């Protein structure tokens, strides 16, 4: 759902999509409440709770892939 929302905005490289969800295990009833064109990836790489998601590395990998750099 987040990918579909982000792809609907032309030229957007990456985004943070905020949802309001009655149940985090299902998209049923989910509502998009905000799309951030400049999200803070550090909240995923250096979270206060839980495990790092490696988002910064994924963003750099995608930039390299799109630039066709080997």
Image (cartoon, rainbow, N blue to C red):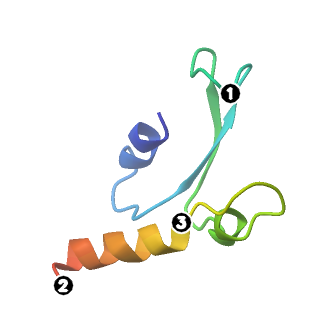
The picture places residue 24, in percent across and down from the top left corner, at: 68, 27
* Image quarter hosting the C terminus: bottom left
Residue 28 position by quadrant: top right
Which disc, if any, is residue 69? Answer: 2
Which residue: 38% across, 43% down?
8
Task: Give whichever of discs 3 and 1 has the lower sequence position.
Answer: 1
Considering depth in this image, is 7 or 58 the residue closer to the camera?
58
Local crowd size for mark 3, using a 10 Å CA cut-off: few (<14), some (14–19), many (≥20) = some
Task: Give whichever of discs 2 and 1 has the lower sequence position.
Answer: 1
Residue marked by disc 3:
55
The picture places residue 45, in percent across and down from the top left corner, at: 65, 69
Q: Is residue 65 above or below residue 19?
A: below
Residue 13 position by quadrant: bottom left
Q: Is residue 30 above or below residue 44?
A: above
Residue marked by disc 1:
24
The picture places residue 33, in percent across and down from the top left corner, at: 67, 37
Local crowd size for mark 1, using a 10 Å CA cut-off: few (<14), some (14–19), many (≥20) = few
Q: CA distance from mark 2 to mark 1?
A: 37 Å
């Amino acid at each position: 759902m987040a990918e579909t929302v982000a792809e609907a905005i032309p030229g957007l490289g990456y985004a943070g999509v905020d949802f309001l969800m009655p149940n985090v295990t299902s998209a049923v009833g989910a509502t998009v409440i905000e799309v951030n064109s400049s999200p803070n990836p550090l909240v995923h790489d250096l979270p206060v709770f839980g495990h790092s998601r490696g988002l910064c590395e994924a963003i750099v990998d995608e930039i390299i892939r799109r630039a066709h750099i080997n």
